[in-house]
Image (cartoon, helix red, strand yellow):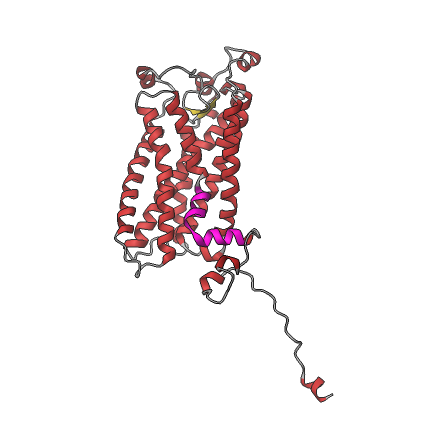
Amino acid sequence: MDIFFDDSEFKRLYGCDNLTADEWTTQGNPNRLAAELYVSLGALYLMTSLPVLFVIFQPKFFAMACYKLFFFSGLLDVFEVVIICVIAAVFQWKGFVFCSEPILSYNLGTIATGIWAASGLCCVLLGFQRLVALKKDWKLFEGAKIYFWLLLPLTIGLGFWGFVKPLLFTSHHYSFVQNPYFAETEEWNAEEQETDLYEDMNFNVFNLTLAVVLTVQLIALIGTLANTNSTKISGKEIAASYEAVAKIFVKLIPAVLFVAVSFFKTNSEIVLAGQLAWQAAHGLSGIIHLALSKRIRNDVFYVFGLQSIEMKHGGSTANLNQNDLEGVPAKKVWEPPAISAVSMRI
């Protein structure tokens, strides 16, 4: 049951009655440098992710099952970046603690935690889909089947939203943490962590499982790509697999750091590293596609007027194939008007 709708439990865990609103304001730790870093990263991540999503949604890419997963995962990433980069920057600038805006902070935390879970499972599906595409001729993700697979991350995201204690932002750690009242100290007390009311075993087990599964998938994909006969697999499939490897890797890092914070004695630097890794795991999606896929990169440049179709192929369209021209509007060439039989008789 969602704690938010259990008034007595919510007040027990997240009550703010022991200080006045003005007193809570003085408890914050505003840091403009951290705020500027977060908003700068958020702007970079959004400016690279949104154009890539627009291009991936075009039929030439969206027809492939893996790019449907890329697109769905990318949408989740965009929403997450807005919360954990842009809004977090505002909170850090103002020196917010949880009780500065408890209802807003709690709802943003539940959404961010749910998106993390949905995005992590979506990454697992992406790794599985790539392994199937490279090694087996199974049609598990073809056609409308892919949309049934996407119900899994949606379900777990909503489940986290309603049944898992969220990560909540505090300016003391410059990040989202499980215990929003935990003040900044040299290191965490392991005994206190074991009995902490804000620990959620569902969240911790999910991150541990995610870290293990992504590690196995990463090793399997790299091994498969190393032994793949490029003459039997299309270049598009291989390129998509390398993009999946990169996305799995950046998702794996925050999962491991979340596990470290939850199960081991850590300090504030590890917590901050986890926040930055979490931001990167969602924000680097667009940069990964731009760096590893020439087709996406060229189409982004073309769509936004940075490159013509001739320029992206070395100044000539003589050697373009159908994949290159697909989705590109053809140039209008003047043709003389047709002469009808009537006009010829005249």
Q: Is residue 127 above or below residue 133?
A: above
The region drawn magenta spans 285-302
Residue shown at the point (39%, 28%) measured from the top left: 274
Looking at the rendered image, the quarter that the N terminus falls into is: top left
Q: Residue at x 67, y 82 (%)?
A: 340
- Quick one: which residue is furthest to the front in this view? 315
Task: Using the image as rendered, state which of residue 96 and residue 194 is in the foreground.
Answer: 96
Measured as percent of width and height from the top left, residue 193 is found at 33, 18
Residue 23 placement, left or right of 116: right
Taking the image as shown, residue 226 lies to the left or right of residue 328, namely left
The C terminus sits in image quarter? bottom right
Q: Is residue 216 above or below residue 94?
A: below
Left or right: where does residue 55 sit relative to residue 229?
Answer: right
Q: Is residue 301 magenta?
A: yes
* Above or below: residue 213 compared with residue 338: above
Is 63 within the magenta? no
Residue 178 pos. (x, y %): 40, 23
Q: Given the current orientation, which residue lies at the most extreme bottom position?
A: 345
In the rendered view, tell whether residue 203 sits above or below residue 55: above
Secondary structure that dominates the magenta span:
helix
The residue closer to the viewer here, 14 or 137, is: 137
- Going 39% across and 36% down the picture, which residue do you hit? 117
